[in-house]
Image (spheres, grey):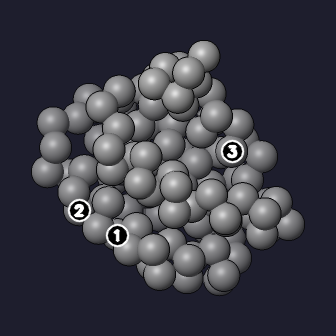
Amino acid sequence: ASPKDPSARRGAARLLAAISQNYAPIQKKTIHTLRLLLKLANDEQDQGALKAQLAAISAISRVSRDSIKKFFDENGQALLATLVKKELTVQVLNKVMFFAIR
């Protein structure tokens, strides 16, 4: 699978989401991927990969104050504002809205 393969991006993001969710010790490691995930999600064309990237961003940027701060330091809220203006599937829009109000 190449980086141009949406299923590879989706799988990598799903892995990051799964290992990071509600587990601060791992978030301290995966927080370093947040900038890249935000960039990928901003540029993503594949809705399935985008949904997984949002899940990873959400899982990484909650629980600890450091990870929440990092999300805002990286201007993560701008991604959410941008995505709301795009044509998204219901599933992806639901993920954006869940993330925005969590």
Residue on which disc 2 sits: 81
Q: Is mark 1 in CB contact (under 8 Å) with mark 2? A: yes
Q: Residue at x 38, y 74 (%)?
A: 75
Q: Which mark is residue 85?
A: none
Q: Is residue 36 left or right of residue 82?
A: right
Residue at 40%, 68% in the rendered image: 76
Residue labelled with disc 3: 16
Visible residue check, residue 6: yes
Q: Which residue is mark 1?
A: 77
Label 2 amino acid?
A: Ala
Image-quadrant location for residue 61: bottom right
Q: Quadrant of residue 31?
A: bottom right
Q: Nearer the viewer, residue 56 or 7?
A: 7
- Point out the tag, 2 or 3, that comes first from the N-terminus: 3
Q: Amino acid at mark 1?
A: Gln
Q: Secondary structure at mark 3?
A: helix
